[in-house]
Image: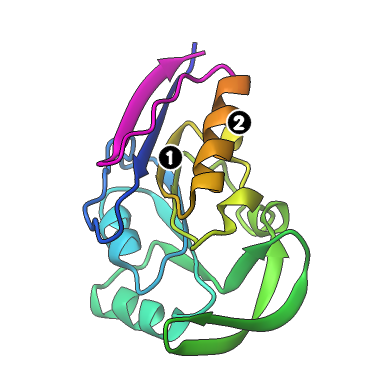
Amino acid sequence: MVTRRFHHLFIQGITEYDFRGIDKNSVVLDLGASVGGFSIHAAKRCKHVYSVEPLFTDFLNANLQINHVENCTVIPFAISDREYTGNLSFFETEKEVRFMPFKKILSFIPEHVDFLKCDIEGAEQYVDFNLFNNIEAELHNCLTVNNVKSYHKRNGIEVELLRGGYEQEAQR
């Protein structure tokens, strides 16, 4: 039996991360790495981090360097249902970026991912959460929350979403 864990942050502004499920041999995928807040801390605990971030790559790379993080690879793409180049904006930042399907982004990662952190501002619908046993995610709308909940239920994972956060350990 595989124990699966999905930790869900529901309230905007929560900045605490749950690193349970990450150890020195773990490979971590950080979708929506931003400037590296999660990636830097995860890299100190694991084998390697793959940080997917389309907008703030300059800040992310600078933070990785300042914090002497060498076990992190930056993947500068946004997640979508198809591959294309277009503008992406977040608050006052706008940039032309490459969009890629989630499966194509995974093809850049040469090893099995043990832990997924996901905070991608509404693009969660394109992520196949079933590929991961440990998930830290912030979901951004009720439709996505309900889709994730029904998706996990169909795949034998009991899910309960709570406003303040959610943690569920389930066996399949």
- Residue at 43% x, 86% y: name it: 58
**Pick the front one: 122 or 106:** 122
Q: CA distance from mark 2 to mark 1?
A: 14 Å
In the image, is residue 83 part of the stretch drawn in magenta?
no
In the drawing, does residue 125 fall left or right of residue 91?
right
Report the residue marked by disc 2.
151
Q: Residue at (60%, 69%) from the top-left corner?
A: 78
User: Is 38 situated above or below 74?
Assistant: above
Q: Could you tell me what secondary structure mostly forms the magenta stretch?
A: loop
The mark total stands at: 2
The residue type indicated by label 2 comes to: Tyr
- List x then y, in percent, for residue 33: 42, 65
Comparing labels 2 and 1, the label whose residue is closer to the camera: 2
Q: Is residue 167 left or right of residue 4?
A: left
What colour scheme does the image use?
rainbow
User: Which contiguous range is marked in magenta?
Assistant: 155-172
| Amino acid under disc 1 | Ile
Q: Classify mark 2: helix, strand or loop.
A: helix
Answer left or right for 26 relative to 17: right
Q: Is residue 168 magenta?
A: yes
Mark 1 falls on what kind of element?
strand
| Residue 135: mark | 1
